[in-house]
Image (spheres, rainbow, N blue to C red):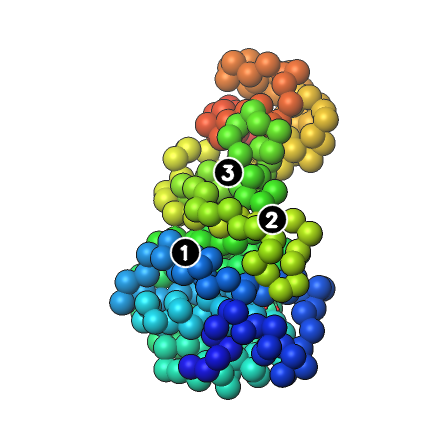
Amino acid sequence: MSHVINPSHVARVMKEKGISAKKSLGQNFLIDQNIVRRIVESADLQGEHWVVEIGPGLGALTAPMAEAAAQVVAMEIDRELVAILQEALAHPKISIVEGDALELDWRAVLEERGWRGEPLSLVANLPYYITTPLIMKALESGLPFAAVLVMVQKEVADRMLAPPGSKDCGVLSLAVQYYAEGSLVLKVPRTVFIPAPAVDSAVVKLVPRLPQVSAPRDQLFQVIRAAFQQRRKTLRNALKSLVEEWGLTLEELDQALANCGIEPSLRGERLSLEQYSKLTEELLKGV
Ligand code: SAM
């Protein structure tokens, strides 16, 4: 595997290959070997592990992960980078797949390359403009990820890990809690990227687990989304149109809130996932 794997050579490689980072694709390339090492270590890869990587860029993480794992399947949207990676990282343990990770069928991509249910992890320095949909896709994919390790903007990390009642708590925080156990692995300063982004980043580890609450998922998230859609409204007002859609009256909404011991004047961010689950189940009793 060639010099492209060495993050400290990124600037040189870009110059040699005539590449400029595309802001529209969220391209900020890692140039710090130490951060790369810590990310790869935190992924806890064993010899039989397969890794899905989103956005390999110039391969800063790809090659070190291939050294620790059985296979790295890396999906990259930028054709120019795909061509460089395919040449520089030509190795039986690495597949570079050209495409939009939001559009690609990850299971099919893996199975075409011989994945037969081996332990699987996702590791990515995510393009910031699609962070949330990519995390949601990973969590909802149904693939048995042992871990989802993502580098995101610090603000997004704060939202992912926000406890109920805090100002950062939102749909993403509740979705993360629903699907996984989340923890902060590493704070990453903006100076370790070329080009340096405007904000700092953080690495977050999600360990998927079975949901800890019992409400049916789709309806639970309809309630959560409705509650956060109009953040400034009280819970009662924010949920009005959803319950009407479900064929319930406002009295039934009030009753459900009362049965759960939830103050109707609260705002959405005050409720825990358990309270949302209970409220959803109460509402569904009337449907
Ligand atoms: N992993 C590299 C690193 O750490 O240096 C690059 C990370 S950079 C923040 C994000 C990468 O995701 C870029 O290479 C970009 O081209 C790629 N990308 C952007 N949108 C994508 C998409 N929809 N599907 C796949 N890759 C995408």
Q: Earlier in the sequence, mark 2 or mark 1?
A: 1
Category of crowding for the residue at label 3, using alpha-carbon neighbours closer than 10 angstroms: few (below 14), some (14–19), many (at least 20): many
Relative image position of residue 105 (x, y in whole percent): 51, 67
Q: Using the image, tell me which numbered label, if any, was put on residue 200.
A: 2
Q: Earlier in the sequence, mark 1 or mark 3?
A: 1
Relative image position of residue 89 (x, y in whole percent): 46, 81
Pick the quarter of the image with the C terminus: top right
Tell me the residue that label 3 is attached to. 161
Pair 3/2: label in front: 2
Q: Residue furthest left?
A: 47
Q: Using the image, tell me which numbered label, if any, was put on residue 38.
A: 1
- Identify whether 175 is placed above or below 48: above
Pair 1/3: label in front: 1
Q: Using the image, tell me which numbered label, if any, was put on residue 110.
A: none
Give ligand 1's quarter of the image.
bottom right
- Identify whether 6 is placed above or below 267: below
Relative image position of residue 194 (x, y in whole percent): 62, 64
Residue at x-position 33% and y-position 56%: 44
Report the amino acid beneath label 2.
Asp
Residue at x-position 71% and y-position 64%: 23
Report the amino acid beneath label 3.
Leu
Report the amino acid beneath label 1.
Arg
